[in-house]
Image (tube, rainbow, N blue to C red):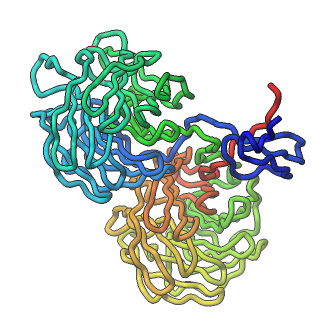
Amino acid sequence: MATYREIIGKKIKKVSSDPSSGTEGEMWYNSTTGTLRGPAILSAWTNCGPLISVQGDMANVGTQTASLCAGGSNNPGSENVNITQEGNGTGFSQGGNLNTERRGCAGFGVQTSAVCFGGYTTTYDNNTEEYNGTAWTNGNDTPLSPGTASWNSGGTLTAGLGYGGSDLGPGATPPANRGKQTIEYDGTNWADGNQMTRTSGDGMTGFGIQTAALAAGQSTPPGSPSATTVVENYDGTNWTSGTVTPAGVAYCGSGGTQTAGIIFGGVSDGSPGYPTKVTTTLSWDGTSWSAEPALATARMGTWGGPVGSSTASQLMGGNSGPGVVANVENFDSSTTAVTSAVWASGNNLNTVRTLGGSAIPTVSDGIVFGGSGYTNVTEQYDGTTWTEKGDLNTARGYISGFGTSTAAVAAGGYTAPNNPQSLVEEFNGSAWSEETNLPASRKSAGNCGTLTAGLIMGGSTAQPYAANVVNTAFEYNGTSWTATPGNLPEAKGQGMSGGTQTAAYYAAGRIPPNTYTQKTAEYNGSSFSEGGDVVSISETTAQGAQGATGTQTAGLATGGQPAKTNTYDGTTWATTANFNTGRNKGMGGGTATAALIAGGGAAPGNTAATEEFTAATTAVNVKTLTQS
């Protein structure tokens, strides 16, 4: 009898705990549980960080971890957009805008070398644009004039493919070759290819490259009761019939190759408005179609190019029925189990408040103090419960805070009725003591660091708030305050901050005369410089959680109505899971992977709600092997 190692090529090892990674076919004996264990394939959809703004009917290209969507609509059937959004597998940042606003466009290539073509502006469009990872430039038009929308696509910048297309210009009667076109791109010019063999229609989906593609389904004319199951394969010259899908499909998202592909979502009928959106996912192995786990959100309007592979694809935005959505889902089929980033409810503060200070290095040990209503109450969080501690000596709001639950600083703020303060107090875990005042009064400044190496940045010195925002900053050594060698690039307050005294960031915020900024200032201990712009913010989002969170190269910005959360890698801000209760000017802290937000201003009034953030995680999907 052959051994397992002789058959599989791997040795069964004895371990006391499961390893953090593994490959299919591997096994080990877990001596702690007394079981034979091994990684198993898991197929599932998980939530990704959302798009910056709602988007559907757009071009899609790239892979799950380097995706791109461009153009489309933020409202079904109208309001074309030119926005480009770039994904990293966990969230989205903004890229360069298209030169032409359009919907119903398609794309191919990769995130840093892509093509967007066709679509609808005020008429059907045959324009082509190329993306270099930063900006779009106009290329040669498609051979179809005045243009066609709702293409399917695939391939690379120098070997691209477009097929299908819904219309060939104005006129009440669609042409006989509607949805049957084939065009090929060589990086400079387009050329006509042989037409598809199917009957006319639109809404097909597909995957593959210029010389090996598959097109599945389509919508029969509006008013018809169903989508179709028709499949065709392309070999670079001709289209031939393929294995039909097990159910009618149309306007689906897709990913993969001609012999290993996946389609998902779309509609099940062709009635006016396409009301019946579906969550269906089907995979193709080159021989047969198989059902996969369903999407969480049924939607259409995501067919403008395949993204990723049959085992790692992505669905961005789309039309869920009454409107366009921003939520994004990732499909994975591997031995890795993915857990989405999420905000979960924690216990409420004992005192409702906003505009307080905080010192929260971790979600299991931090404090908040002061706040609106000019309270002096201090509360400590142990990861489960808020407990009252010693009160501030001077009740105030709009405080800057940093440090830990046993060594914290509360600097500046306003006392009733809106009197700016330079007061500084230190907390030792049980009581506050007055220390050296700030060199100048300061309200709602950025803050980070420790009791012996702290930093406050910007803020306002008087009322009216916005008119008196400043660009100066101060360092604290535990005894005295010193002005920083350089000033912020722009005067601002009520932003979101994190890091250390020598490596800090200060993001978004309120600027003179009374508006909001997306800019990030970075400090290196001697000077300030501009970092990446925060994405996915509004006027109320810019006034986020006031506490220090994360580091200069791993930051987290939270806050706003509606709720928004962004992550920072030291260069680019990207979306991640949004918290549940929209609020601004709350108290926050923690790290980029484990943070919290507490209190804040939430319509119709202030809130005591606490939410805790956990970043996305991956782990090997381990199963116990049994006889059955």
Q: Residue 80 in the image: state x and y as whole percent.
A: 24, 39
Residue 518 position by quadrant: bottom left
For the residue pair 436 and 13, the one nearer the viewer reads as 13
Q: Residue at x 67, y 41 (%)?
A: 24
Left or right of 64 on screen, residue 337: right
Q: Residue at x 31, y 18 (%)?
A: 219
Q: Residue 242 in the image: state x and y as whole percent.
A: 38, 20
Left or right of 618 on screen, residue 110: left
Q: Residue 308 in the image: state x and y as whole percent.
A: 44, 42
Screen quadrant of the N terminus: top right
Q: Is residue 491 shown above or below 352? A: below
Screen quadrant of the C terminus: top right
Q: Residue at x 64, y 76 (%)?
A: 409
So how many labels did they put on this image? Answer: 0
For the residue pair 615 and 401, the one nearer the viewer reads as 615
Q: Residue 403 in the image: state x and y as whole percent.
A: 66, 74
Q: Is residue 587 shown above or below 215? A: below
For the residue pair 368 and 536, the one nearer the viewer reads as 536
Left or right of 496 on screen, residue 193: left
Residue 415 shows in this picture: no
Left or right of 171 on screen, residue 75: right
The residue sitting at the front extreme is: 1
Residue 318 shows in this picture: yes
Q: Is residue 481 shown above or below 591? A: below
Residue 481 position by quadrant: bottom right
Q: Residue at x 60, y 90 (%)?
A: 480
